[in-house]
Image: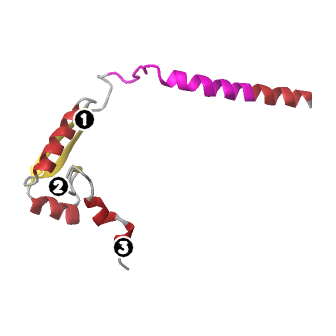
Amino acid sequence: MIKLSKILSTLIIAFLSAAIIAPIYSSSPVVPFAFAEEREELSFEMWTLDWDTISVDAGDVIEQMVRQIGIELKALPLSEEVLYDNLDLEHTFEVYEMSFGFSPYPIHMHDSWHSEEIVD
């Protein structure tokens, strides 16, 4: 019984130590394991609506942001006929961006997705 008690005490101390050390370790800089010549390049084409200035601008900003982390993204404005038909029928797109409202405040989401709008 004493042996079991020692084993359990040792396990508890180990788990508590890990709980204290893990947050300290995770806040330290992480050394990358993959070097540039060994990494696979990520490259995508993102479709935006050509008439929607918010969609085009958002696509440009997203393109710039993901480039900073090494992802090559090309924002491509397309007409709504091409984009909508492909979303519904063909599904040949890689990524698309579509703005669901023209306000900086997302109140439009309430009208589209709130549970009180469910119709049986």
Q: Are marks 3 and 1 in contact (CB under 8 Å)?
A: no
Residue name at image x 25 percent, y 60 percent? 108
The image quadrant of residue 38 is top left
Q: Are marks 3 and 2 in contact (CB under 8 Å)?
A: no
Tell me the amino acid under the disc marked 3: Ile
Instruction: Name the residue type under label 1.
Output: Val
Tell which circle, 3 or 2, labels the residue nearer the N-terminal end.
2
Q: Where is residue 94 shown, x and y percent of the image?
A: 23, 50
Tell me the residue that label 1 is attached to: 66
Residue numbers of the magenta segment: 12-35
- Determine the main secondary structure of the stretch shown in magenta: helix
Q: Quadrant of the C terminus?
A: bottom left
Which residue is denoted by mark 3 in the rendering?
A: 118
**Residue that carries the numbered disc 2 in the rendered image:** 102
In this orientation, which residue lies closer to the viewer: 57 or 14? 57
Residue count near mark 1 (Cα–Cα under 10 Å), binned few <14, some 14–19, many ≥20: few
Residue 80 is one of the magenta-drawn residues: no
Looking at this rendering, what residue extends furthest in the right direction? 1
